Amino acid sequence: MESRNAERVRLRVERDKLKATDPAGLADAWSMIEDLWVGTVARARKLPDAALHEQVAGQWSFIQTNRHLVLVTDCWLRRTVKGIAQAYHPWGLGGSWLTSPRRWGIDPEADPSLDQILALRRERMDEVRDVITGATAAELERNCIPPDSPGHPSTEHTVLECLHVILKEEWQHHRYAVRDLQVLEGVRDTS
């Protein structure tokens, strides 16, 4: 019971960080996200490559989860905050809502290795950190108008709103990745 309460407290602290509205708070939240992923990637590297492509209970594999987070950054940071018209990397991965990925320049059949997708993720994570590091209070309130090209989102959002989406997606998908790694590690231990 005590460990369950400690876990609830930890999750509440993490969720509260995700709601930061000032540059220092956002930097702290992003640092937390990067730290979470460092440990999780180290765990994933201990598994065989095939396991990292395996879907647990029909959910995205570890590699697919990282591909999705590339797309999240491409949508909310590169397309919306930076205004890049062709913001999407071919390895990005969207859910079933993305009905025409090729229109965006995405290859749904792409199959990057762990090292390849992690190198791309590192580039995207560095971009997020750079935007947060350079942000001012005024910049966070700036309205971003997405380019008139195929992509998401298609409506205006502030820089802060975009960063909140990225933070929440990173945090939530990290939780899914940890959950699935626990299953994969258990399967590996029993075989």
Image (cartoon, rainbow, N blue to C red):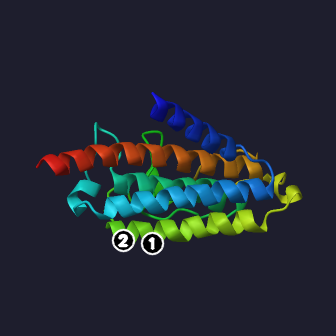
Q: Is residue 93 left or right of residue 162?
A: left
Q: Position of residue 26 (x, y in %)?
A: 72, 55
- Whole-number angstrom distance, CA of label 1 to CA of label 2: 6 Å
Position of the N terminus by quadrant: top left
Residue, disc 1: 119
Is residue 118 among the parts visible in the rendering?
Answer: yes
Depth check, front residue: 53 or 111: 53
Q: Residue at x 28, y 36 (%)?
A: 57
Q: Position of residue 176 (x, y in %)?
A: 42, 43
> Please, is residue 103 above or below residue 4 in the view?
below
Say few, some or many: other residues with alpha carbon within 10 Å of mark 1 (under 14 / 14 to 19 / 20 or more).
few
Q: Residue furthest top?
A: 1
Q: Quadrant of residue 183?
A: top left
> Please, is residue 80 above or below residue 10 in the view?
below
Is residue 106 among the parts visible in the rendering?
Answer: no
Element type at marker 1? helix
Q: Residue at x 25, y 48 (%)?
A: 184
Q: Residue furthest left?
A: 191
What's the mark number on residue 115?
Answer: 2
Q: Residue furthest front?
A: 2
> What's the residue type where badge 1 is placed?
Ala
Q: How many marks?
A: 2
> What's the residue type where badge 2 is placed?
Asp
* Marks 1,2: beta carbons within 8 A: yes
Depth check, front residue: 171 or 76: 171
Q: Residue at x 54, y 50 (%)?
A: 170
